[in-house]
Amino acid sequence: MFNIIRPVIKTSKNLVIPNVRTRCLIRMLSDGARPSDQGVVSAVDDYQVQLNNILNGPCSTKKLLKTINQFYIPHQFSILDLAIQKGHHKGIINNLIRDFFHSSSAREFLILEMAKNSHIDLQRTRKILLKLYQSRGGKQSELWYPTIGPLDYHRFLMKDETNVIITIINIALNNNLTSMAFHTFMDHKERFEKNSIFQQEVLNSLILKNPLQDEYQLKNILEFQNHFNTKFNQFQANQIMSKISTPTTTPLFFKTISQLVIDNSPLTMESYINTIYDLISREVYNNNPESCAENWLKIKGYYSNIAQHDLNILASLISIFTKNLKYRPLVEEIILQLPSDLYGDPILVVPLLEFATEKRRSDLANEICLKIQPPISRRLLSSLLKLHIVFDDTVGTERIFQEINKSGEPLTKGDYHAIVSKLLRKDEFLRALSIVQSIPINISESSYVALINYIVDDSLKNKLEISDKNLAIIDTLLNKMEQFNPKNHGFWERISGLYIKYLAHSKNIENLQIAKQIYLNSTSDPLVKKYLSTNYQNSKAHIPGLEITYNPFSIIQKPEKIILKISNSSQVIILKTIADGAIKLKDKNSLNFALGYLTKLGFTKQDLINDFSRKYSKTISNMGFSITKNQRNRNIENHQLNFMKNRKFLAPVDKQKKLK
């Protein structure tokens, strides 16, 4: 990574000060960077030795203060803490006061020191504040926050500790030390229970846009709101929502903060609906139909005409509900309210056709087809081809083939998948295999997945291991795809899902444990995360030390060491598969494992209870979605299955262990 480096700068016989480059390396290494040459290792070693000498050896205040600014900031705080413990307090404080206006480290540490000790030694804190004030010639400045009034000597002799705390917080706020101000405020929150003005000042400091601190400030806002339960004004609500729009925001955090804003803000109808739209879009991506349903039910009646809703949102809802059997009644409801002249709308027509195909609704399919107007997109032609194939409409299928030929474009992977899937539904495996083997490799991925899925399902249905003959077929297909495109992450993620299904649904507790270990291997390792990153996918680089398993079905010995391609988008399916296997085996530990990680991905406890209860309880499933939210939750509470009761739903802390 680094070719040339001067590890340290020697300044005296016994004093070694790390240079700027070394301190940057220390920070990078602390963030997980990997050294690639001996120079980096040497620099880090020298830095650590010098730090230990400072922390463990005798050192005068003068030498310590001369050295301290050369260290990485967290280490500076350790040195200062130790120096104060050793009796260098007066010299340290005087130097911090001297450096206060031109050193952010001095400001941060001095304010932290006052905040920590104000309740222990109020007199000492007053003296520090007074010295700091006198160092400015007793003049008002931007250092002091205007709301606390004129500052003079008598101010610091008062026996009102609250004034001192307010002063400390305001100094921190005016020096952009928002997090420190907040934590000092929360440490003394009982003093401000009735001071709504000061509460708002602290809250306003947290909502200011700061890309480097937004995530931490959002967590602080959540803590603040949990205690004070204040109401946001429109500006505050908009600022908070702008903070959670960053790509790094986790699904659960996005949902939690959004709900906080919705529940505590005077949002206009338009703002409210747009906020719900954002939540739905995220939950569609996160494959969370329960949360999509919950949010849709909140806003579906806001317009007298359902067509006034964003059609892209309606299309997304139709698609995700169609893929999840228990949520299809919501699609029926949307279609009943949708004006028929929108059936042919370019945004809605494909998801509507997919629903008609999955439900075998020939009447609906005919209505949709009557509303279609030219020009017909290639995507729509593929949907029509699948429709006619599923309904065994030979004439219609031939007509669509002719239209595709007229378009001058070849069959797509979706077209081949529709043909192969139809043959597999009729158990014509050999015919399907013959077609799959003839498909051009660049458009074969969906058909490969369909064929392997058939083999897995057949094995699980007959409670048998996959035969050697079928293992050979799988091996041939996966070897071809690996040679053609090892970075086709969508394909390999689906293969990962099939293998986890094969393990988790085998009704074998040992296989279920292996599935859990493979999930951890594939999601916790930093090398795997790097492999799945966009930058890596766009490069041709090889990551040393990383061995992805392309054909897990061929692994016989030590399958628990397998590493699969599992990205954020496929984790939900895999964890639900593990949960299903755990429920069938009545394995509480494995169920807690799956539910915990689903929580980490953005599912709330209520989402999971609702979703799994609908899946495994006919009583709850038959309730539908027409009852109120409170009625539905009450019925779910009364009828939820035993396996969902008393679950902890705790998001786990990743502690990846290297497999030997």
Image (spheres, rainbow, N blue to C red):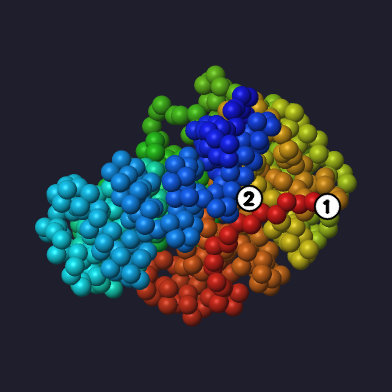
Q: Looking at the image, can residue 484 be seen?
A: yes
**Closest to the observer, 388 or 113:** 113
Residue 230: horizontal and vertical position, in percent?
25, 65
Q: Quadrant of residue 263?
A: bottom left
Mark 1 lies on a secondary structure that is loop
The label number, if any, that marks residue 558 in the structure image? 1
Residue placed furthest toward the right? 468
3D distance between C-alphas at marks 2 and 1: 19 Å
At label 1, the amino acid type is: Lys
**10 Å neighbourhood of mark 2: few (<14), some, or many (≥20)?**
some
Indicate the quadrant where residue 420 lies. Answer: top right
Looking at the picture, does residue 632 appear above or below residue 216?
Answer: below
Residue that mark 2 sits on: 524
Residue 130: mark in rendering: none
Does residue 606 appear to the left or right of 266 in the view shown? right
**Nearer-N-terminus badge (2/1):** 2
From what the image shows, is residue 546 above or below residue 630? above
> Looking at the picture, does residue 54 appear above or below residue 162?
above
Point out residue 189 in the picture as x, y percentages from the top left corner. Answer: 30, 69
x and y, in percent, of residue 460 in the image: 76, 58
